[in-house]
Image (cartoon, helix red, strand yellow):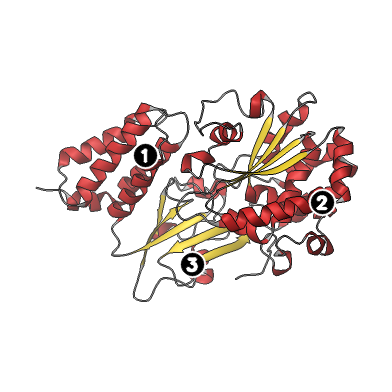
Amino acid sequence: MEKLNQVLLRDDVRVGADLEAWLAIGGGEGLAKALCDPGAVIGEIEQADLRGMGGAGFATHRKWAPVAAAADGDKTIICNGNEDEPGTFKDRFLLEHTPHQVIEGALIAAAATRANHIVLYVNPHQQQAIAVIRQAVGQWQAHPRYAELERLLGAPLSLGVVPSSGLYIGGEETAVIASVEGGFPFPRRKPPFPSQQGVHGAPSIVNNVETLAHIPGILRHGAQWYRDLGIGNATGTKLYSLSGDVLRPGLYELPMGTSLESLVFEHGGGMLQGKEFKAVFTGGPSNTLLTKRDLDVALDFDSVRLRRSRLGTGAMIVVSEGTSIVRKVAEFVSFFAQGSCGQCPPCKGGSFQLMRLLNRIDTGRGVHADLAALENLCRILPGSGRCGLIDGAVTVVESSLHQFREEYEALLMA
């Protein structure tokens, strides 16, 4: 694995639930700075241009600022480790191997926003991650800096692990809040946003595991250090979950802005023997496809968006020539159809109809009317749900039709 510019995955930070080992390599210094000057933290995060690593790429400081400005009282920081999308496996690695980095990031967020609750929301299927993070929580609660943070807040600080529902939809931020409150993870429409009305109506922040893991380094070394880690206009590093038809699938931390070609052919070792690169599903299956002509794209939020795609979580699912795009899309849309919570009829029914049409076409039973119906659903379904599930399903279908329409047409009955 490439060691240049690594921040989250360096060998020496993989200390597991050993707080003393984390502190021995400089861990805790970011929190110490935040405790000395909590009012400066959000400005430092803004200067670093840290964005949300859970998929949307939303500026982190813009989530934090409204909560910091809210009147003192109950406020909650949620570390979102639900991670249940195919092809994405970065957060569970961080929780298992460097949990103190993640927890310190959450403690810094609490200091900056005067939040008195921290919830580590973890997929229950990741039992090892839950065991490690619970052990790490106990060590922080016994550390003097934890008491120092409570004195800053002027109130007891609750820090605990809450297993998620284990459902894909349970990772959407309003569904996370509903689950933390003890209910079923039904998403709700926004506004109000969590920063206005979150857990039990109080201001709340939902940040991805990877996002929070970056915070201690930024506070310790400064915003400019973090900016300089990226390539071009991109800042920091990114975890890329590389899978599919490559020789060395795995988790790679690389400078934000690393090219797709470098990720696949240099770090990933290139394609499996006898295979040729065809395409990659970017950011997991809820996003879009990039093809051979996009191998030069810089893997950062803005550059990928210019190619009509999205970086998302950083998951890269590589497919080779000879692999049916229609079949892959049918598999992914089936995942979404099964993951719909059923709260919104257009999402539940629409995802099922997308799945049904795709399966008909994939198995050679489709006709031109089925393709027309598929395209019509892509026009009318977006925005019909309370969350982005149906939009994600439509996005991958639309992108595959744009890039590989001939494959669909070749499967239709005369």
Quadrant of the rendered image containing residue 152: top right
Residue ID at (67%, 68%): 4
Q: Amino acid at mark 3?
A: Pro
Type of the residue with mark 2: Gly
Disc 3, disc 1: CB below 8 Å?
Answer: no
Q: Quadrant of residue 371?
A: top left
Q: Indicate the secondary structure of the residue bearing disc 3.
A: loop
Q: Is 134 or 84 nearer to us in this picture?
A: 134
Q: Is residue 246 left or right of residue 209?
A: left
| Vertical comparison of 298 with 204: above or below | below
Q: Residue at x 81, y 39 (%)?
A: 111
Real-space Cα separation, disc 2 to disc 1, in angstroms: 41 Å
Q: Residue furthest left?
A: 414
Q: Amino acid at mark 1?
A: Val
Task: Looking at the picture, tell me which residue is in the foreground, 244 or 82.
Answer: 82
Q: Which residue is mark 3?
A: 249
Image quadrant in which the N terminus is located: bottom right
